[in-house]
Structures are given as structure tokens and as C-alpha cells.
Image (tube, helix red, strand yellow):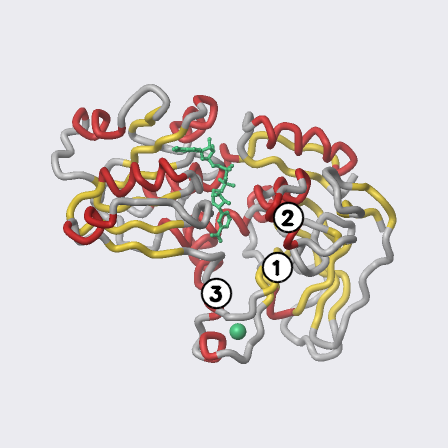
């Protein structure tokens, strides 16, 4: 089968033929229809320091996808050929304290599809049946293909109650933009979004941001003042991984404000801890999605009118993957989808 492989320890990816995966008794084989390019894939493509220490070579990469089940293992009785599914990208141990308690997103031994386990940028992928989410009828293939990052946005945005709250989102990448729409859907009053990239801030506006702030030339505080917010933001969602953005959040929260951190910063970002302590801030780290409460919430939000479709800005055939990665490197896109059906 065709697959996009990190075939050597160097920048780029190779489109090549690899053997089709075979499945175990508790696994399913899925014919991949569409895949999303994630920031993680870009790190692997560019072969940055994180990728160099994390990715075993060779590896089929990719983890955002939708496809159809074509074969089920002998012990799988609740899925069938033809089911339209996506995969939860975190493989968990099933045995640690958190797994046994049902907090599977907090497994201590998580492995990543397309990171240290064969991925989805291929015509077929094999996954444990317990890692498969069967889509409800009516969910479009495009949206189904990005349930993984949509799940990051959902898990982060719904970490704290949002009804009537004022929300600051730092980072208008695809995940930040989806979080805007989710926060509005969940009843937030104002959703202010910061970034340095005007194109991405425009996308955030399309997804419902009340106000956007390009922090290279304006201050978040001024935007909040103009909205009549005298006490700061109730909820902050960090979705950039940038050290200045985290400080922007800490500086602009109301006392008692709640911050969820999804963006992956350098390990040693300095913040003024006095502001955290004296302002009584709550800070929560977010990894992945809740299995499978987040997946359920994504489905029901789409069924109750949430529209995140503008976040998908480009489609390419998998053969043109390099064009997709180039756009991602420029930052001149939202989600980029690769089509594996043609
Ligand atoms: P992205 O890189 O496409 O978007 C990040 C955005 O932040 C960019 O538009 C960038 O211009 C902006 N930015 C940079 N500096 C900024 C600043 N000072 N203030 C405001 N914005 C700034 O990323 P994405 O795919 O949307 O993902 C968002 C973040 O979440 C990334 O850091 C990613 O690594 C992380 N992530 C974490 C998890 C997890 O499980 N914790 C999962 C997926 C992604
Ligand atoms: Zn575990």
C-alpha cells in the first residue's frame, strides 16, 4: 500500500509502498479515506529536536483520519466492515491506576499513533478496536477526519464552565480557532483571541471571536477595556505554546480565573508566580482527549449546531502532501486535509 513514511533521520517524508498491516484478534483494519495534517506531523516533517529524540525511523506517520473498517479481528463483536470511524491517537496500557479508574487520557504509559506506533498517512491502518470511534450518521467526512485536534480543542475549552464567561484564547492556530467556536457554543459571552498572524486571526473571527488582537501591535488589555471588562478574563485557553502568550494569560486573568494549557511550551518558561498565588489562579494541563467523553461531546455539539467547518481551508491528494506541509510551514492555512481515496 501507499504510505507517507519518515524513512530516514532527516527532514521530509517519502511516499512509498509498504506492506499492508495485518490485524490481531482485538484489532480492526481501516481503509483510510482522509487525513488531517497536525502540527506534530510538521515537527516530524521538519525533523526538529523533538522529532529527532522521539520518532523511530522508519515509521508511517499521521494520526488524524477518517476511514472505513474493512476487516475485524476474531474477538471484535461491536464493530463491522463498512463502519465509518476515526482513531483515538493515544494507545493506552489499560492496566495503570488511571486506566483502571476510567481516566484513560491520564494513562502513565501512553503511546502515540504516528509517533511511536505505525500511523494513518497510509491506505490502511490497523488499530485496537478500543481505539476506534464509530461516527454518528450525518458527521461529514471532512469533520470526521479532524476529530483528533477538534478533540484537543474540546477537551481544553470544556475544562471549565463557560456559560456567560469571558474567555481569552492565546493562539489562533487550527485548535485555537476551533476552541473559539466551541466556547461560543458553550455559552461564553466574549471570546478574545490573540496571535501574531493576521490571517489566522481572520480565521478566528470567522469562527466567532468577539475581538482579535495581534499582539505584535496591540494589547489584550485594551481590547478587554473596550469590551467593558474591568476585572479580566474568567477562563484562559493557551493554544500557542509560546512563552509570551502564557504570560499574556497570567497578566489578563480575573482573580480566581481558570487557565487550561494545551500549547506545548519550552520546558522552562518563566512566569510571575506571585500573580498565580495572589490572584488565586487555577492552572490545568491538558493532554489529548478524554476517552471517550470528549468524542461524545464533539458529536453532540455538531449535532446541536456547532459549526467548525471554516477551520478546514485546504484539500490535497496525498500525492501532493509536500504542498500541504509547505502551507503549514508558512502558517497560511487552517486545517489541511489529504485525500487518500484518489
Ligand atoms: P499552531 O502552531 O498551528 O498554532 C499556534 C498559533 O500560535 C500560531 O498561529 C502562532 O502564530 C500563534 N502564536 C505564536 N506566538 C504567539 C503569541 N505570543 N501569542 C499568541 N499567539 C501566538 O498549533 P495548533 O495545531 O493549533 O496547536 C496549538 C498548540 O497545541 C500547539 O502548541 C500544539 O503543539 C499544542 N498541542 C497540544 C496537544 C496536547 O495534547 N497537549 C495536542 C495537540 C496540539
Ligand atoms: Zn494506563
Residue 103 seen by the camera: yes
- Check if mark 1's residue and mark 2's residue have beta carbons within 8 Å: no
Which disc is residue 232 wearing? none
* Crowdedness near tag 1: few (<14), some (14–19) or many (≥20) residues, C-alpha within 10 Å: some
Comes first in the chain, label 1 or label 3? 3
The residue beneath circle 2 is 51
Q: Report the front residue among 91 and 272.
A: 272
Task: Name the spot of residue 230 as percent of width and height, x first.
Answer: 12, 34
Q: In this view, does 312 lie above or below 79?
A: above
Question: Is disc 2 placed on a helix, strand or loop?
Answer: helix
Q: Name the residue under label 1.
A: 112
Proximity of marks 1 and 3: CB atoms separated by less than 8 Å:
no
What SS does tag 1 mark? strand
Circle 2 packing at 10 Å, graded few (<14), some (14-19), many (20+), is many
> Which residue carries the number 3 mark?
105
Picture coordinates of residue 84 (x, y %)?
65, 56
Which of the two labelled residues, at mark 2 and mark 3, occupies the earlier sequence position?
2
Disc 1 from disc 3: Cα separation: 12 Å
Label 3 secondary element? helix
User: Closest to the observer: 314 or 41?
Assistant: 41
Give the residue at x 63% y 57%. Answer: 85
Q: Is residue 250 above or below residue 99?
A: above
Front residue of 154 and 274: 274
Q: Indicate which label's residue lies in the foreground, 1 or 2.
A: 2
Disc 1 versus disc 2: distance between alpha carbons? 13 Å
Side (left or right) of 67 relative to 142: right
Q: From where the camera sits, is residue 36 visible?
A: no
Residue name at image x 75 percent, y 41 percent? 10
Q: Residue at x 42, y 42 (%)?
A: 239
Q: Where is residue 80 in the image (x, y as percent from the top left)?
A: 69, 67
For marks 2 and 3, give the CA distance.
22 Å
CB at disc 3 and ligand 1 closer than 8 Å: no
Amino acid at each position: 500500500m501507499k504510505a507517507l513514511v519518515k524513512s530516514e533521520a532527516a527532514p521530509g517524508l517519502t511516499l512509498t509502498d509498504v506492506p499492508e498491516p495485518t490485524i490481531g484478534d482485538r484489532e480492526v483494519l481501516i481503509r483510510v479515506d482522509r487525513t488531517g495534517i497536525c502540527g506534530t506531523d510538521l515537527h516530524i516533517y521538519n525533523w526538529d529536536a523533538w522529532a529527532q529524540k522521539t520518532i523511530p525511523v522508519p515509521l508511517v506517520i499521521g494520526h488524524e483520519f477518517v476511514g472505513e473498517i474493512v476487516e475485524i479481528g476474531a474477538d471484535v463483536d461491536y464493530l463491522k466492515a463498512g463502519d465509518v470511524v476515526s482513531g483515538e491517537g493515544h494507545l493506552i496500557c489499560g492496566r495503570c491506576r488511571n486506566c483502571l479508574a476510567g481516566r484513560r487520557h491520564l494513562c502513565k504509559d501512553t503511546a502515540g499513533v504516528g509517533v511511536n506506533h505505525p500511523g494513518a498517512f497510509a491506505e490502511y491502518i490497523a488499530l485496537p478496536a478500543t481505539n476506534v470511534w464509530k461516527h454518528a450518521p450525518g458527521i461529514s467526512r471532512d469533520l470526521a477526519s479532524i476529530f483528533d485536534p477538534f478533540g484537543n480543542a474540546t477537551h481544553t475549552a470544556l475544562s471549565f464552565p463557560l456559560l456567560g464567561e469571558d474567555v481569552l484564547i492565546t493562539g489562533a492556530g487550527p485548535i485555537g480557532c476551533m476552541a473559539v467556536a466551541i466556547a461560543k457554543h458553550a455559552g461564553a459571552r466574549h471570546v478574545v483571541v490573540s496571535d501574531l498572524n493576521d490571517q489566522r486571526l481572520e480565521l478566528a473571527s470567522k469562527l466567532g471571536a468577539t475581538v482579535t488582537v495581534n499582539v505584535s501591535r496591540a494589547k489584550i488589555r485594551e481590547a478587554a477595556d473596550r469590551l467593558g471588562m474591568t476585572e479580566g478574563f474568567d477562563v484562559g485557553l493557551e493554544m500557542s505554546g509560546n512563552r509570551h502568550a502564557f504570560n499574556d494569560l497570567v497578566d489578563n486573568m480575573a482573580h480566581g480565573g481558570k487557565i487550561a494549557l494545551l500549547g506545548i511550551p519550552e520546558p522552562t518558561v518563566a512566569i510571575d508566580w506571585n500573580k498565580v498565588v495572589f490572584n488565586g489562579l487555577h492552572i490545568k494541563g491538558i493532554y489529548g482527549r478524554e476517552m471517550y467523553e470528549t468524542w461524545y461531546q464533539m458529536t453532540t455539539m455538531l449535532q446541536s449546531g456547532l459549526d467548525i467547518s471554516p477551520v478546514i481551508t485546504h484539500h490535497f491528494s496525498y500525492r501532493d502532501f509536500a504542498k500541504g506541509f509547505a502551507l503549514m510551514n508558512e502558517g497560511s492555512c487552517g486545517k489541511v486535509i489529504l485525500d487518500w481515496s484518489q
